[in-house]
Amino acid sequence: MNKTLIKLICIVCMTLTLSACLLKPFRFDVQQGNTIAFDKVSQIQTGMNENQVRFILGSPTLQDIFHMQRWDYVYYLDPREGDIQKRHLAIFFQDGLVDHITEDSMPQFAEAPTKTPTAKS
């Protein structure tokens, strides 16, 4: 009786230990930088001033003191499921107006994923 009880306890402990290895802990989405959306970037045109660009995209993530005519917008998303997304947009100014833009290739709708909570019934 004693040996059977000890065997049963060992089997239950091993089963619980192994089942815990299969579970993944909850992980939050890591989102950093400015959200760079295709529709927002398409609004930026040459000849716009800095205030107009700041109104559309927000303040730049990086503003180098050695290159004051260049604003960098960087976006990084590490979702709990799926691939890491990295985007970079650089806006160059000449005399306070947009001269040209360089950007990474981004999907047509480059919005950050938003999940709305679902109501439980």
Image (spheres, rainbow, N blue to C red):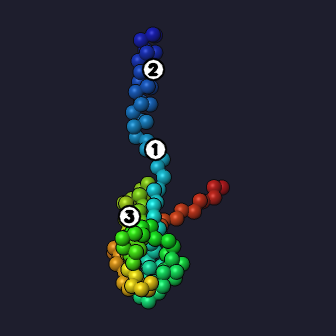
Cα–Cα span, label 2 and label 3: 47 Å
* Viewer can see residue 61: yes
Looking at the image, is 90 positioned above or below residue 1?
below
Q: Secondary structure at mark 3?
A: strand
Q: Nearer the viewer's eye, disc 2 or disc 3? A: 3
Q: Nearer the viewer's eye, disc 2 or disc 1? A: 1
Q: Which amino acid does the dot numbered 1 rest on? A: Pro
Query: Could you say which quadrant of the image residue 82 lies in?
Result: bottom left
Q: Nearer the viewer's eye, disc 1 or disc 3? A: 3
Instruction: Identify the residue at the far right of this view.
Output: 121
Picture coordinates of residue 116, whole percent (x, y): 57, 63
Q: Find out whether the residues at labels 2 and 1 contact each other: C-beta distance under 8 Å.
A: no
Cα–Cα span, label 1 and label 3: 22 Å
Instruction: Identify the residue at the far bottom of this view.
Output: 47
Circle nearer the N terminus (2, 3) = 2
Circle nearer the N terminus (1, 3) = 1
Picture coordinates of residue 50, whole percent (x, y): 48, 81
Front residue of 14/93: it is: 93
Q: Which mark is residue 25?
A: 1
Front residue of 32/46: it is: 46
Q: Which mark is residue 85?
A: 3
- Residue at screen point 41% across, 62% down: 76
* Viewer can see residue 56: no
Looking at the image, is 111 positioned above or below residue 119?
below
Q: Which amino acid does the dot numbered 2 rest on? A: Ile
Q: Which mark is residue 9?
A: 2
Q: Secondary structure at mark 2?
A: helix
Q: Residues within 10 Å of mark 2 (few under 14, many from 20)?
A: few
Query: Could you say which quadrant of the image residue 32 lies in?
Result: bottom left
